Image (tube, helix red, strand yellow):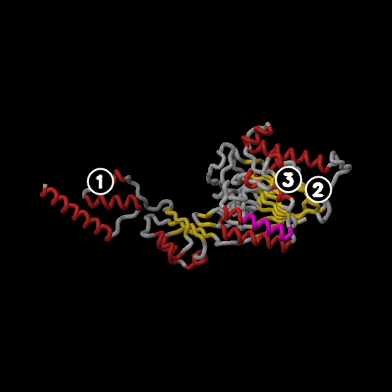
Amino acid sequence: MLILHTSDWHLGRSFHGTGLLEAQREVLGQMAATVRDRGVDLVLVSGDVYDRALPAADAVEVLDRALAELVTAGAAVVLTSGNHDSAIRLGFGGHLMGASGVHFRTRMDQVTAPVVLEDPDGGLVAVYGVPYLEPRHAGQVWEVEPNHTAVTAEAVRRIREDAAARFGGQEHEQEQEQDVAVVAMAHLFAAGGAGSDSERDIGAEAPENHVLKNQVPGNQTGQADCAPEELLVGTLGQVPVSVFEGIDYVALGHLHGRQRMAETVRYSGSPLPYSFSEANHTKGGLLVRTAGGAVTGVETVDWSAGRKLAVLRGRIEDLLDNPDHAWAEDRWCQITVTDPVRPPQAYRRLKERFDGLLNFVLHPDVGAAAVTSTYAARLAAATSDLEVCTGFVEHVRQRPASASETALLTAALAESRTALEYEGGAA
């Protein structure tokens, strides 16, 4: 059997105020083409199908069409809810849709309700979908500690127990063990994973739907194998990979960079980049092959849709004139200007060359000349009204007033004095 592991579609998301729905339609079309061309039997979507709990109507329409295309291309589909999804809304109609080959797993009580398929190469594949587990709620229901590790460990324990009973000859009139590949889907932060700026913090203490940036150091390409001892970042929201021991394949979602946590524990990553920290990611999914009740191989599949990303940094004259930056002219851009003094009309000038400029940052190089005095100190040192005005301009704009601006301020001050003198004489 050939399984396509995907996650984090985030349908309806915008990128620095720019809608991504057309790019999402395009990449989902490429996904359906992969299913058709490679003969994929099963598609997994490990959470964050939507970007918000109340998705817009056009995002719902995109999901509806995508699922129809995947089934028409020949695949069954299993979707779980992520921390961005409303589990109830995403799972609506699940019983009816299951009859068409689209299976939703959005409730805790569905953890032990696997989707079981016959492997054309012999044996079975049992997919256990674990929805995003909010620790305080899941911990109370399952009577375990209210943290991500404890509730995930309990979910996996229940999966192992169910698989042993279901396929090990212990019940359901099953007289002998069957060859079965047990696949688990989960949406969480595995310890050692490389995060990006576009993931919501799912730490144990974070309130539900509270948006936080996840600034995690580590492999920002999202491509290399990631060992826990190399990239471990200690937070309450992380789950040790050892929790999944004994599962044949674990299809993880939440982190947007494709990465291997262990040979059989992997993130597919998101199909599109959702932050400039993902500019160097290669986006796509993972193809997992099974035969005879075992996982026999994993390979990558790449997709590309919408504008690519560019991250540029430097002095403004180099950014504007250097032909080496031509590759970024048709991309969505984040540009950091490192001049020690804010260049005049910097955003407008950069926008003329890079029309996809979405994020402009002024960040002088370390050691560059910088304004060190406060405005109060400038005001105290001023010897004239003109110095007060030009000092204010320099303070708020981080560069001195130009000659023409100084001339305008001088004229304005002269007119003000004339007006005051006239009003004083009239009085």
Mark 1 or 3, nearer chain start = 3
Which x, y percent locates residue 209?
Answer: 55, 42
Residue at x 16%, y 52% (from the top left corner): 419
Residue that carries the numbered disc 3 in the rendered image: 128
Q: Amino acid at mark 2?
A: Val
Residue 227 visible to the viewer:
no
Q: Amino acid at mark 1?
A: Ala
In the orientation shown, which residue stands out farthest toward the bottom?
Answer: 323
Mark 2 or 1, nearer chain start = 2
Q: Secondary structure at mark 1?
A: helix
Residue that carries the numbered disc 1 in the rendered image: 381
Mark 2 or 3, nearer chain start = 3
Q: Quadrant of residue 272?
A: bottom right
Which x, y percent locates residue 165?
Answer: 81, 39
Work out whether 241 lies above or below 41: above
Q: Quadrant of residue 315?
A: bottom left
Q: Which residues are magenta?
A: 62-74
Q: Nearer the viewer, mark 2 or mark 1?
A: 2
Residue that carries the numbered disc 2 in the rendered image: 180
Q: Amino acid at mark 3?
A: Tyr
Q: Nearer the viewer, residue 201 or 227?
A: 201
Which x, y percent locates residue 227?
Answer: 66, 47
Q: Locate the N terminus by quadrant.
A: bottom right
